[in-house]
Amino acid sequence: MDVQELLKFADGLVFTKIGKHLDDLQQAVVRGTWQGKRYSEISKEVHCTERHVRNVASKLWQTLSEILDEDVMKSNLRSTMERYEFSKISNSGYFNLVHKGNINVCTETPHPPTTPQNSPPTQTSTEDDTQEKPRLDLRDAPELRTFYNYPNSPLTTLENSIARQNCRLLTITGMAGTGKSAIARNLIPQIQSQFDRIIWLSLRTSPPLETTLKNLIQFLSNQPEINIPANTDTQLSILIETLRENRCLIVLDDVQQILSSGQLAGNYKPGYENYGTLFKLIGEIPHNSCLILNSWEPPSDILTFTDDNSAVRLLQLTGLGEAATEILRDKGLLDEEHWPELINLYQGNPLWLKLVAQTINNLFNRRVSKYLSYQSVFLGDELTPILQQHYQRLSEIEKQAISQLSNEIEPVSFTQWMAKCQGSQGELCKAIQSLARRGMIEKLSYESETVFTIPPVLKQYVKMVAE
Ligand SMILES: Nc1ncnc2c1ncn2[C@@H]1O[C@H](COP(=O)(O)OP(=O)(O)O)[C@@H](O)[C@H]1O
Ligand SMILES: [Mg+2]
């Protein structure tokens, strides 16, 4: 759905309900919201006060909420609308809504829509190739939600890598909440016209490679399960052949679930080493398809690809930076001048910021300044278990090194850090490299030297564990 379609859609809904079309200001609000603009920006464009724009928007959201029987607001307009397919029926100006989720809504249409009650949450089509391209299986993917894009954002980088550089293997890494799934999900509408088939699979339940290959072959080559051989090598050849014949996009999410705990980053869990063969084949063998891996850390095989292989890319996410202000705005926080400090503390991690914004709303009456003056980093019941999962994956030597680093006030150089840790230099060196791959330490350049720090949220957690 593009902005014109959204406008037509919203206009049709409102017309059905109140018999009036959207006026210019309402259209500007819908358009601006779609583009991720603030009310203040929209108000400048339409030359009226922000307050007036807010009032108009608020009434419009209310009308749309009543029609759709679910809460519509600035932050979810896009995702809510995208859950509906629409088709204009004759020239009556009415719309026939088909909800892709589990609620079934219809507007006043001459013929009520027939919508399966239990239709899958996202678009899927498994029919034959006469279907419109691409064939999609996004049942395992998260919903499209409000997504703030910005110049040079990872989304743009990924789009370019796939569209212009024909990347075959893309790995997106970052701690929980950095937005890996959101980026991959928002990438799909941008590039889907270039692909014949697109499938999203999550490895959250740690499926063995055979299961994953079967699922991929079944969908991508349209094979009934019964025809798929049991032998993994044969399955791999069938898959590669399919990736050559059709341009396919595969997203494997939550790849960290097949990687091991208690060891350096990137080692496979016992029994999952054969996933490495899949990743290597897709990266090395020429074909026109693309595999995106989302993971807390890069699987070891990814690191063996050398820089000169432009078909293979690794993208480490570090947070939204300035775009994170939009998240705080959506949450209705106050004291905008303190937002950069808050974003810095939480590394621009959208999930962590959403969680702390809830706390600030609940306990500090939306005042960021009050929150910051009370406590610099608050972990809370939601963030602690997330950090715990990351910490528990570390090897003993990584735990030792990170706890040493969390005692430092200033950034330290490699030599200073090593001097404070016990163990062989070689082992420590590997541990530091591994922590960096996990995105759990930050590297900064300082007077031609590399220095290391630990992000404030993790520092707080590591100190808490040490107590
Ligand atoms: N660029 C963005 N703009 C707005 N919200 C975002 C953005 N990136 C991520 N989010 C939100 O942050 C949360 C965490 O993102 P998610 O993709 O689930 O992280 P990850 O997959 O890395 O754990 C989700 O609620 C997601 O909608
Ligand atoms: Mg995710």
Image (spheres, rainbow, N blue to C red):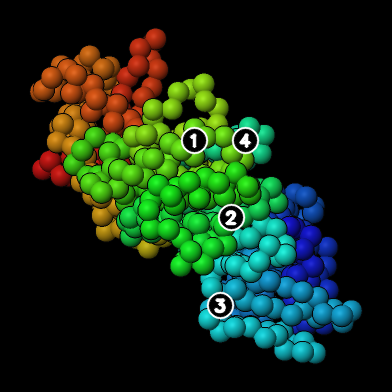
Q: Label 1: which residue?
A: 283
Nearer-N-terminus badge (1/4): 4
Quadrant where the image shows the C terminus: top left
The N terminus, quarter of image = bottom right
Position of residue 330 relative to residue 65, above or below, is above
Q: Is residue 250 visible?
A: yes
CA gap, disc 4 and disc 3 = 34 Å
Q: CA distance from mark 1 to mark 2?
A: 18 Å
Give the numbered dot on residue 198.
2
User: Residue, x 77% and y 74% (percent of image)?
Assistant: 87
Q: Residues within 10 Å of mark 3 (few under 14, many from 20)?
A: some
Mark 1 vs mark 3: which is more N-terminal?
3
Which of label 3 and label 2 is nearer to you? 2
- Nearer the observer: mark 1 or 3; the answer is 1
The mark that comes first in sequence, 2 or 4, is 4
Query: Circle 3 sits on which residue?
Result: 119
Decide: is 145 above or below 447: below
| Amino acid at pointer 4 | Asn
Quadrant assignment, res 293:
top left
**Type of residue at label 1?**
Gly
Helix, strand or loop for disc 4: loop
